Image (tube, helix red, strand yellow):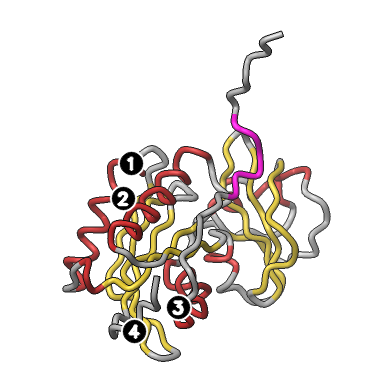
Amino acid sequence: MTSPFDAGARFVLAVDTATSAVQAAVVEIDGDELFLASFRRLIDGRGHVERLAPFIEECLAEAGKTRADIGAVVAGVGPGPFTGLRVGMVTAAAYADGAGIPVYGVCSLDGIGGNTRGTALVATDARRKEIYWAVYQNGERVGEPQVGKPAELPDTGADYALGEGAAKYAAELKIPAEPDAVYPDPVKLVELAAPRIRAGAPTEQLTPLYLRRPDAKPVDQR
């Protein structure tokens, strides 16, 4: 696929369903600057399937754009629970394939941690009384995302914690946590993918960050 900017397209569709937030946005790339043209978010851990497609259409309408105006798709690839995460990634890949435009994946935690300062622990809700987490130093992730029980995390050196998981398990984390849940920022997701978008990098096969095996296991046939 060619660069979306070959034909002057400057608008990117961003989706993320790695948390309980169902999110869609249209983001404009104008040179080195990014602008949020439209945005939809609903906090509903079981509403990803029903809400994401309508949100995309609503974002296009609010931004005054059609599918032909979208030059690329950016998707949060987790980590996140299997079902919700899969909805966003499959929708993003199908949208891009149908429109003949590239799709790019970004770690969803980076959509939160990329906006932080100092040393921050970003934690989202992994269910089963666990969190997905990563440490950020002035907006740059240190190491790979992890999953674990909040009370059993190693000493991360973080000064504070934020994210849906941090708000839910503030007492167990042993460091100051922002009381209000924070979710991946779609503009930050697009910003992190922007170098690939501007360069016309090939479309990517989205690879989900599940971090743990699904509950279902194959039956031993022996």
Q: Earlier in the sequence, mark 3 or mark 1?
A: 1
Q: CA distance from mark 4 to mark 1?
A: 33 Å
Mark sitting earlier along the chain (2/3): 2
* Residue positioned 37% across, 51% down in the render: 22
Callout 4 secondary element: loop
Residue 200, disc:
3
Residue tagged by mark 2?
Answer: 52
Find the distance from the CA under tag 3 to the CA under tag 1.
30 Å
Q: Please give the residue where the numbered disc 1 appears in the rendered image.
A: 49
Q: Residue at x 40, y 78 (%)?
A: 3
Q: Sort mark 4 into few (<14), some (14-19) or many (20+) by Cα contacts within 10 Å.
A: few
State which mark lies toward you, 2 or 4. 4
Tell me: residue 49, above or below residue 21: above
34 up-or-down from 114: above or below = below
Badge nearest the viewer, 2 or 3: 3
Q: Dot 1: few (<14), some (14–19), or many (≥20) neighbours within 10 Å?
A: some
Decide: marks 1, 2 in contact (CB < 8 A)?
yes
Mark 3 vs mark 1: in front: 3
